[in-house]
Amino acid sequence: MKPLKLRTTLTLAFTGVLALLLAAVGVIYYHALALQLDADATSEVAELTSAMHAFLRFDHGVPALLYDRNDPEQVAFVERAARYYQIFDAESGRLVLQSPALAPLGLQFTPSEVEGFRERSRPADVFTDQGRLRFSNSLMTAASGEVYLLQVGVRLDVFDRARDRFLRLLLWSLPACVFVAMVAGRWMAGRALAPLVRLAAASHTIEVTDLGRRLPVRGAGDELDEVAKAFNDTLGRLEHAVGDMKQFSTALAHELRTPLAALRGETELALMEARSPEEYRRSLGSQLEELDRLTRLINQLLTLARAEAGEIPVAHAPVDLAALAASVVQSIEPVSRARGIALTCAGDERALVAGDAGWLERLLINLLDNAIKFTAAGGEIVVSITSAARSVVLTVRDTGSGISAEALPHIFDRFYQSDPSRSSATGGVGLGLSLVRWIVQRHGATIDVASAAGEGTTFTVRWPAADAPRR
């Protein structure tokens, strides 16, 4: 089944809710009108009964209406009250008097029915061929002591017609109101969704090659503006990600092209002319170096890709960073000494952080490897650990060639090399600091770099202490 469009769904929902509301209101109004009409009929019959008690007298058992026949208002009121009335002997149930308007209706009550009317104080409805009548039941005592049952009635057909007309009007007006509500709801839904339709049309015009474009924001500050802003933020992130992918692809192609070209050149030279076994060994050794570089590059790429994909678990156990740094410095110190670089470790004897010892060791090795590569003989590298109440700070400072201000914001990008020729000489591929950034982020730490060309570089990493609350 094909799903309904949002505009149709909103229209049907609005129409359905309004139809239910109108139906509920109509039913409530109908019952309220019926109750009010019933109360009006009861009030009228009670008023007419009071008038009959005031004007009716018994003379030797014969009832008579005594009123001023010269008063038009009194005459009209008494005639209205006496239009439908009848009197019964309360003891025998005999009909004593019946008004001329009641005679054609053929109302004949038995003594038992009269006895029931006598015991009933509430008005009673009687159905006749000419409609319903509501009778009041009241007792009157003559001067001679006889007790009579007086019934005064009013016709209910006027009230019934008013109620029926209201019901017909309700039944005719409800579908018309629902139809008008459906048309109005569809129009309002279209007006409300028009900005969203324009946003959809604008989004269809944005291609991968044109991610710098943004959706228009109306400035109304409503939910649709929030949708446009969120989509624009997504476009910004996508533009940045696509830019990173393009840069990554270009850099990866460059990094793979260099060792492959070297391997092809070495192989072609070896095949072009006969060589001595020693020359072949030197050629194969050179090719092995290029193969080792390719292997390191691929391994680092796989490690970084798996790390960023979340496939490599990172433990969060207490680690003594000071002891770990001392151990790493001790293992790398022979390499730095062979290159004429002084490597020392200083700071607190104990500094606990929550993290993965293996990844923290990789972080230190990468930072030190980077410092050794770009520090000349006679230089110095100092690793220091300081522990405070809320944080642990690792500092790796070298006296190397430094980083220019233009290159500083990009040093954590993949394959970024401020001096590619020098990086090739040192065997770097531009992935070490990218992995350092990932390790820092996964440990909830921060990393800062301070450097200037020719003045050395200082990397500062801050962790929350192992016993401090982590954000």
Image: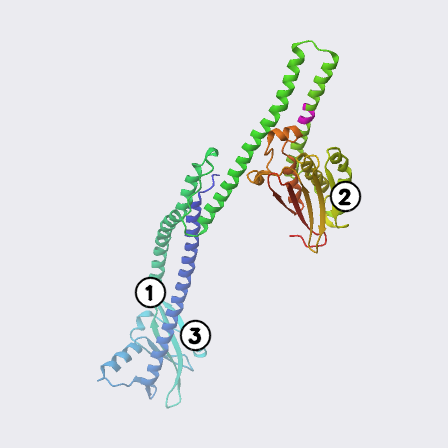
Q: Which residue is mark 1?
A: 162
Q: Are marks 3 and 2 in contact (CB under 8 Å)?
A: no
Give the x, y percent position of residue 199. Answer: 42, 43
Query: As drawn, which residue projects farthest toward the bottom?
Result: 144
**Mark 2 or mark 1, which has the lower sequence index?**
1
Give the x, y percent position of residue 82. Answer: 30, 78
| Residue type at tag 3 | Glu
Q: Nearer the viewer, mark 3 or mark 2?
A: 2
**Distance between mark 3 and mark 2 Cα atoms:** 115 Å
**Mark 3 or mark 2, which has the lower sequence index?**
3
* Image: 113 above or below 200: below
In-front residue for pair 103/420: 420
Residue 96 visible within the image: no
Q: Nearer the viewer, mark 2 or mark 1?
A: 2
Residue 241 is left or right of residue 447, and the answer is left
| Residue type at tag 2 | Ala
Residue 53 visible within the image: yes
Query: As drawn, which residue projects farthest toward the top?
Result: 274
| Residue type at tag 1 | Ala
Q: Residues within 10 Å of mark 3 (few under 14, many from 20)?
A: few
**Mark 1 or mark 3, which has the lower sequence index?**
3
Residue 291 belongs to the span the image colors magenta: yes
Which segment is the magenta one? 290-294
Query: As drawn, which residue projects farthest toward the front?
Result: 378
Q: Which residue is mark 3?
A: 113
